[in-house]
Amino acid sequence: MIKNTIYFFFFVLMLSACKFGSKTSDPTLRDFTFEPVKGIRYQEVKRRFKNGLSFNGEGFMQKPSWIIEVVKEDTMSAWSPQKQRMQKFYMQYDHGNVYNFAAEFFKVKHISKDSLVFQRIQVDGRVIAADLRSDVNMTFYAQDYIKNKLKTSAADLQKPTKADTAFIEKRSARVNSNSDSAFAATDPVQFIPKSKIVRVEKISTVDRANNRTEAYDYMFPQYIIRIDRAYKDFAYQVAAVVDFQGGIHVKTIYNVLPENAEAKKKVAQGIADIYVRNLFNVAPGTTLGIPHNSEITLTIIGKVIKRP
């Protein structure tokens, strides 16, 4: 009797595994198939957090940019900005309505000949992360639908909304009232030289091999300022808030001993006030054209004139 029960248990397990395997390999057993939309080219027109906005509180902006087309049930074609052409990717069904292609996981929330809605998600060990990384909805419209039914362009549909503008205005007013507060500016701070004795370089940290996109350059902007004819040789790296009027407020100084940090911070602040503010026009960071406090990493290097 016990042996028969064990055989029956293993039979049920095998049957369940076969059913799951069939569902994974046979698209007709899933909630939907991509067959009805095969060959339709879609363009992403909006990318929103769950609150319906393109921005989060840190200033990160979701920018719609994808162009996709279903080639067949297991193949998705997507536009490659680097190669300037559509590139095919294997589309792997994972579970539920979750698919993987182009090294990203997506949960399909809506599918029709006019539009698609995907939730871009972060999967860690086959578990969907319940945080900001999975809080993104991407809406695609068919290019034919945009042109012939909506009679507009993808570029117009991709523009920030009035709600986005209202959010940035409110967020800016809040941080601008406190020089210690800031959020990332989509158009970062600019240092415009007024003298030939200074140079500035904005450092790019884009690394596509490690999924470090252009967003890192505005979320965490880094600059090197070089000053010739300084009163002495010096080099300081600091975290600073550049306020909405271009004022520089040093928050943290790096690469110094803790017991020297406060004194060195005051020196760095003096260099920012005397050298940087007088030798550069400092344009504050802006988002949607609205100036606001933003944080930067700034390295200031001074070289004294070497006399013969």
Image: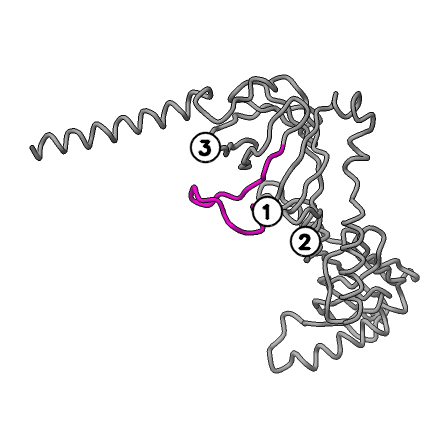
Q: Marks 2 and 3, Cα distance to the nearest angstrom?
A: 29 Å
Disc sitting over residue 56 in the figure: 2
Q: Marks 3 and 1, Cα distance to the nearest angstrom?
A: 19 Å
Q: Residue at x 86, y 59 (%)?
A: 283
Q: Is residue 121 left or right of residue 173?
A: left
Name the residue that disc number 1 marks: 135
Q: Are marks 1 and 2 in contact (CB under 8 Å)?
A: no
Q: Residue at x 53, y 44 (%)?
A: 122
Query: Of the residues shown, which amino acid type is indicated by label 1?
Result: Asp
Q: Secondary structure at mark 3?
A: strand
Residue 103 in picture, x, y percent from top left: 54, 35
Residue in the foreground of this view, choosing between 113 and 184: 113
Q: Mark 2 or mark 3: which comes first in sequence? A: 2
Region of the chain picked out in magenta, as a range: 117-135
Q: Are marks 3 and 1 in contact (CB under 8 Å)?
A: no
Residue 227, located in which quarter of the rendered image? bottom right
Q: Mark 3 or mark 1: which comes first in sequence? A: 3
Please, which residue is most extreme toward the left here? 1
Q: Residues within 10 Å of mark 1 (few under 14, many from 20)?
A: some
Name the residue that disc number 3 marks: 94
- The question of residue 93 being in magenta is answered with no
Residue 288 in picture, x, y percent from top left: 82, 50
Classify 82 as above or below 224: above
Q: Mark 1 or mark 2: which comes first in sequence? A: 2
Q: Secondary structure at mark 1?
A: loop
Residue 193, located in which quarter of the rendered image? bottom right
Q: Is residue 6 left or right of residue 131?
A: left
